[in-house]
């Protein structure tokens, strides 16, 4: 089975063309080698996939005939992604929320003046 079709069928990508684009950009490696979309994969292969700033590590257990339901995905792959990868993403999300809460909109005139007062040097 092709690597792009496999990643689509085990629901890592919404469409097969997105999976193909990820392969073309070099975000997908099979057995530590960058894979083209047409690369054939077999049970026992190790896949490293970079998506949303996370390096997913997968082992192929079996090849599905077509796209499978979310509950059946674990029959076809084993996810060996370390927890540190997810913790790093969580840390980035909290860092972005530190400056301004989501949904508060643009800064008001008072907010802007407070920012300017903070940034200017009191000489």
Image (cartoon, rainbow, N blue to C red):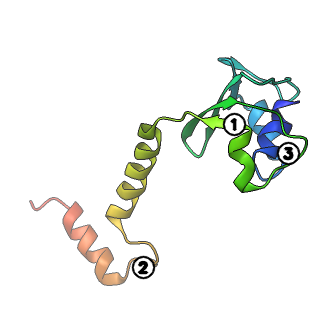
Q: Is residue 10 positioned above or below 107 on the image? A: above
Q: Looking at the picture, how far across and down is residue 38, in whole percent?
A: 88, 27
Q: CA distance from mark 1 to mark 2?
A: 41 Å
Q: CA distance from mark 3 to mark 1?
A: 18 Å
Which residue does the numbered mark 3 point to in the structure image? 16
Which residue does the numbered mark 1 point to in the structure image? 77
Mark nearer the viewer, 3 or 1: 1
Q: Looking at the picture, how far across and down is residue 85, in whole percent?
A: 46, 39
Q: Earlier in the sequence, mark 3 or mark 1?
A: 3
Looking at the rendering, which quadrant does residue 84 occupy?
top left
Image quarter (top left, top right, bottom left or bottom right) of the N terminus: top right
Q: Residue at x 46, y 45 (%)?
A: 86
Q: CA distance from mark 2 to mark 3?
A: 37 Å
Image quarter (top left, top right, bottom left or bottom right) of the C terminus: bottom left
Q: Residue at x 82, y 45 (%)?
A: 9
Q: Is residue 100 positioned above or below 41 on the image? A: below
Tell me if mark 2 has few (under 14), some (14-19) or many (20+) residues whose alpha carbon lies within 10 angstroms of its own: few
């Amino acid at each position: 089975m092709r690597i792009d079709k496999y990643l689509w069928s085990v629901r890592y990508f919404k469409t097969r063309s997105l999976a193909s684009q990820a392969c073309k950009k070099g975000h997908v490696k099979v057995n530590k080698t960058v894979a083209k979309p047409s690369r054939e994969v077999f049970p026992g292969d190790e896949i490293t996939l970079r998506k949303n700033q996370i390096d997913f590590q997968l082992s192929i257990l079996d090849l599905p005939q077509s796209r499978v339901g979310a509950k059946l995905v674990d029959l076809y792959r084993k996810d060996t992604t370390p927890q540190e990868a997810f913790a790093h993403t969580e840390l980035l999300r909290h860092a972005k929320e530190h400056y301004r809460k989501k949904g508060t909109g643009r800064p008001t005139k008072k907010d802007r003046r407070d920012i300017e007062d903070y940034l200017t040097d009191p000489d």
